[in-house]
Image: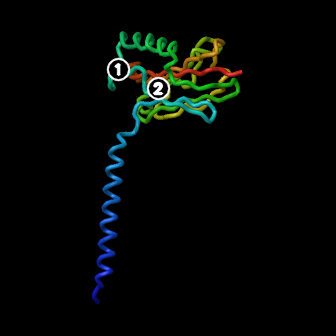
Amino acid sequence: MSLSTRVIAALGAVVVIGAGTVGGSIAYASSQGKPAEREATLVVGTSSVRSAPLCYNGGKPLDQAQIEKCQLDAKKAGKDKKLESLDVKAGDRVGVGVDPDTGERGWFAFTDGGQQGQSPIAQEVKDSTFSGTVLASTLLNTSGTTTVTVVEADQKTNDIYGVWYFELHTES
């Protein structure tokens, strides 16, 4: 059986188009960069925002001076309205998510609200990337702006590796 010239040309065209598609897809994918790493996500109801850590030392523990600077930088960023934020109502549910590497090392999250002036969202989480959700009314402070802090920490050594900050703006 012999193939006609048309069939051979058609097969050649399919191979060329297929190779072009694969080549174009590879070029497109490589231009997209890596997926975001070291991001935390704040979730309120069905809304969410993501942020890179405000304080991170390339995977090495932060020393005390870096932690103190981090806290000052967070206050300034909050004052300058540069922290990622979401609006929240008392009846909403709030949660926090982290990237898999942070989840593997360990992390915790809290707010500067609640009855004691500090309210946990997640306590000593390890090998998990989501806190679950907490009723917002238990997390909020009376000022109308509540800071959410997420900390990547080794639970055995208490070393801190990264800190993220978000804000919750209370709606009536």
Could you tell me how far apart the alpha carbons at marks 2 and 1 are, in whole angstroms? 13 Å
Given residues 82 and 101, the one toward you in this image is 82
Which image quarter holds the C terminus?
top right
Q: How is the image coloured?
A: rainbow
Q: Where residue 12 sits: x, y (%)?
A: 29, 72
Q: Is residue 26 above or below residue 61?
A: below
Residue depicted at 62% across the width and 25% down the height: 87
Residue depicted at 51% across the width and 32% down the height: 97
Residue depicted at 52% across the width and 17% down the height: 81
Quarter of the view holding residue 16: bottom left
Which residue type carries mark 1?
Pro
Residue 61 is tagged as 1
Q: Where residue 82 sits: x, y (%)?
A: 49, 19
Q: Is 53 left, or right, of 41 in this rendering? A: left
Mark 2 lies on residue: 107
Quarter of the view holding residue 13: bottom left
Element marked by disc 2: strand
Which residue type carries mark 2?
Trp
Q: Is 9 left, or right, of 54 in this rendering? A: left
Mark 1 residue crowding within 10 angstroms, few (<14) / some (14–19) / many (20+): some
Element marked by disc 1: loop
Residue depicted at 62% across the width and 20% down the height: 169
Residue 75 is tagged as none
Q: Where residue 117 sits: x, y (%)?
A: 60, 11
Q: Is 156 left, or right, of 2 in this rendering? A: right
